[in-house]
Image: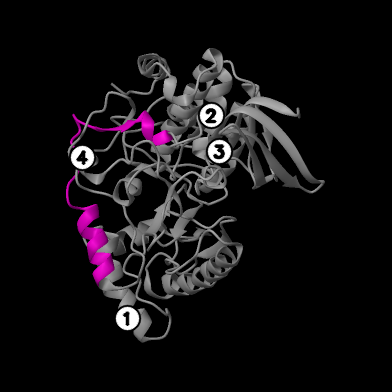
Amino acid sequence: MKASYDVIVVGGGMAGTAAAVTAARNGADVLLVEQGTALGGLGTAGGITSLISWAPAFGGFGLEMYNRLAAEGGAAPYSSHADKPYDGEYMKRVLDGLVGENCADMLLYAKVTDISIDGGRLAGIELCGGEGKFFVTGKYFIDCTGDAALAFMAGEPCEPLGDTQAPTLMCRYTGVNWDEYQKFLARYGGDNVPMIREILPKAVAAGDVRTADFHHPGAFRINNVLTLINVGHVYGADCLSPRGLTEATVEGRRLAAEYLGFYKKYIKGFENAYLVNTACTLGIRETRRLSGRYMLTFEDKAGYKKFDDTVMRFEGGGESDLHASSASEEAYNAYYTLFTSEQPRADDWASLPYRCLLPQRAGNLFVAGRCISAERKVQGRLRTMGNCLMMGQAAGTAAAICLKENIASDKININKLQDTLLRQGVKNK
């Protein structure tokens, strides 16, 4: 690797991978930094191997990625269904290939430990790996850490955490008889919610499960062999500190064993289920969020607001997937009411303004992914994989344009950015 790059992307999740590839395709010399063992973030290491996207808006790099995954046998052909299961091992290789083929340099096992600032702009990042600490400089930076870590280190304003959405740990089962499970689920109208609400309290009363987590999302079929289980929520988790993450991950693994026993005992079709593994990474939904040039509000989303500087479309309307921060039935009912309050109109959309990707001060820093500048109830929808892919593409494209024109992020010709994204398959205007 080199000592200096045009664009440095920190965080190799879906947003970061999309940002790195699109910045490189638009002419930038790119370094992609990821502290884990694989690209894809929660979509690989986190075990959430189902692409959630809103078909009327989804496009660009994310759709290209999925189509390549399907062509290589790692997923079914793309459909308009909201959840599209895939094989996570195939996804790792597809992302490796897309980054390598587009001349973006990649570093796994590297964590940002410090930054340098020169004249109000980020100048470089200090990385730490097995060989110790080293420094890399850049002209533009894209924060796809999920925690707004670069922005926070740079002193940019961020939203206070408060009662954040509880994380969960994903598990993979084998040995599930899905025909039997579907028959069993049919007793509850094919809906996991009434099934859990009836059965889980019985398991708690019998001492088989500690907490009646009505928010348990249930089982998802990946293929004929694997079933994905999103085990119980780890309420009250501190997902920013090493100590908090350690405690939450250990609790997640305890819950994984507890729920395996629950499914085998109470749910038909799971009698011979076997826990293959738990995810390497905790399924974090929310931590720190940027307070950027514009804070997207829930009223903007609910009202299908269109902005002059729109970079992507996403689901409008008054619903959101905002998981509860406690196990109380009141908190769950608040979530369920919000989640089911209004389905988005198929012929309309909300829009994400470019300003939500920009910190208030640093003119060479972009932020993409679940930590962008948006209120919690909007973030609950924007944080899904399909939206993160398009946010990353917007940030990577913007960084490359700013590089070519040697301008600050807020000086970009927004029409040029929008037209470039549209040619790349990302609907905006």
Vertical order, 50 against 120 (above or below): below
Vertical order, 246 against 405 (above or below): below
Residue of label 4: 344
Q: Position of residue 104 (x, y in %)?
A: 64, 26
In the rendered structure, find residue 91 and report the number of the disc placed on it: 3
- Magenta segment range? 330-357
Three-letter code for the amino acid on which mark 4 is drawn: Pro
What separation in Å lies between label 1 and label 2 (alpha carbons)? 55 Å
**Label 2: few (<14), some or many (≥20) within 10 Å?**
many
Q: Position of residue 74 (x, y in %)?
A: 52, 37
**Label 1: few (<14), some or many (≥20) within 10 Å?**
some
Query: Which quadrant holds the C terminus?
Result: top left
What separation in Å lies between label 2 and label 4 (alpha carbons)? 35 Å
Residue of label 2: 364
- Helix, strand or loop at label 3? It is helix
Q: Position of residue 213 (x, y in %)?
A: 35, 71
